Image (cartoon, coloured by chain):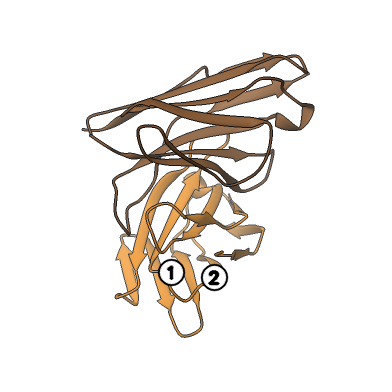
Chain colours: A brown, B orange
Amino acid sequence: SQTIHQWPATLVQPVGSPLSLECTVEGTSNPNLYWYRQAAGRGLQLLFYSVGIGQISSEVPQNLSASRPQDRQFILSSKKLLLSDSGFYLCAWSLAGVGRPLHFGNGTRLTVT
Amino acid sequence: GENVEQHPSTLSVQEGDSAVIKCTYSDSASNYFPWYKQELGKRPQLIIDIRSNVGEKKDQRIAVTLNKTAKHFSLHITETQPEDSAVYFCAASKSDNDMRFGAGTRLTVKP
């Protein structure tokens, strides 16, 4: 069966510091991969999605970036964090094709101080 | 792009009562509508989904209805239990990379 791993679970970083969140999927090949952000008490905002290695689409212009160096690895990065980057970051995967549900990782709670 | 609106934002019911959450979508090409449940501090988990060629789907105490003409779909939970308390999200998509979520409904089931 497929599993998704996301780490770290929690992170406290000062403003201006870099960020790297990692997500890996097991048990499937060539999944679609996604990064979502959830502000406190809010909905899910799509940040990036990828349909293949090196293929990244950005939904929201910001100081975050994403990379997919391997088929089942998705990384969210920032060179300099802002206070507004605080939130709950969720990685997700789905099979390719229409009508496929998303399967979320356990999330990373990021607090920028 | 797709816009999904969800209401109510909060819902409180007595244990055993029914709960209904409604969503509307803007893009008539959307054809897949999942519902997710998120408990406090945890990841959203799929509880039920429906495709545009089906009007209703049921799984035990949970059912989802879809009205394509009106572009709205609803989640129905019957015989609610305290463990149903969570935030529920609806979503809509028409391709495999554009799933858009509603803002969420915080459901509280009072024992």
Element type where label 1 sits in the image: loop
**Residue type beneath disc 1:** Ser
> Do we see residue A5 in this rendering?
no
Pick whichever, A54 or A7, lies toward us. Answer: A54
Q: Residue B37: percent from the left, percent from the top?
A: 48, 48
Q: Mark 1 lies on which chain?
A: B
Q: Which residue is drawn at 29% across and 75% down?
A: B53
Q: Residue at x 60, y 46 (%)?
A: A45
Are circles 2 and 1 on residues that touch, CB within 8 Å?
yes
Relative to residue B15, is residue A112 drawn left or right? Answer: right
Residue A20 is labelled as none
Q: Residue at x 62, y 18 (%)?
A: A19
Q: How far apart are marks 2 and 1 (CA)?
A: 8 Å
Residue underneath mark 2: B25
Furthest toward the front, the residue is A54
Residue B30 is labelled as 1
Q: Determine crowd level at label 1: few under 14, some 14-19, many 20+ residues with C-alpha closer than 10 A.
A: many
Nearest to N terminus: mark 2 or mark 1: 2
Relative to residue A92, is residue B56 drawn left or right? Answer: left
Where A19 falls versus B15 (above or below)?
A: above
Q: Are marks 2 and 1 on the same chain?
A: yes
Where A60 falls versus B73 (above or below)?
A: above
